[in-house]
Image (spheres, rainbow, N blue to C red):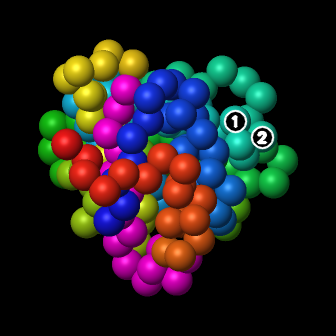
Amino acid sequence: MISLYCRSVTDTHGVASSLAQLARTGDVVILSGDMGSGKTAFAQGFADELGVDEPVTSPTFTLVHTYDTGRVNLHHADLYRLDRMSEVADLALAELVEGDGILLVEWGDPAAPLLGDHLEVRLRHDDNDDDARFVTVRGVGRTWAARWERVEAAVATWRVDDPS
């Protein structure tokens, strides 16, 4: 696990952009954290790096937005409104990444066991600074383990030893 500190939305976008540079077809990134912790801001930075040229908003009511970058489809899901795992299963999220897709899931914690290998990005407010966020990044499975040194290097600018 890597602990990071983002002093601003610009930093959050920077972390997301750095991780997006390492993403490839079939990847799953799960975003977790309280309401307003920066999940959508992270998604915006990630999408921007992939070449999405339209506004990226939280897909809370539609559940999934798909953005075609010309190179890869970014599927941006939000599971906040789902109450049961059966609803998550009905979305068939794993199928979205087959072929040419990357899946980014806000409020994705409950779906993690269904999605296999993934990168977990957990964001939380800094109680002493409204603009700042603590971020932890953790790879689950072999897919991210193989790239872990590159992940560490990509986010080194924001790394902290003690995330408190």
In the rendered image, residue 130, in percent from the top left (x then y), is placed at 32, 16
- Between marks 1 and 2, how big is the CA–CA gap? 5 Å
On the image, numbered disc 1 is attached to which residue?
48
Foreground residue, 42 or 5? 5
Q: Residues within 10 Å of mark 1 (few under 14, many from 20)?
A: some
Q: Is residue 102 magenta?
A: no
- Read off the residue under disc 2: 51
Tag count = 2
Give the residues drawn in magenta, as a range: 132-147
Q: Which type of secondary structure does the marked residue at label 2 adopt?
A: loop
Residue 153 as seen in the image, left or right of residue 60: right
Q: Quadrant of the N terminus?
A: bottom left
Q: What amino acid is labelled 1 in the image?
A: Asp
Amino acid carrying label 2: it is Gly
Please tell me which residue is depicted at 45% across the width and 80% down the height of the picture: 145
Q: Residue at x 57, y 65 (%)?
A: 153
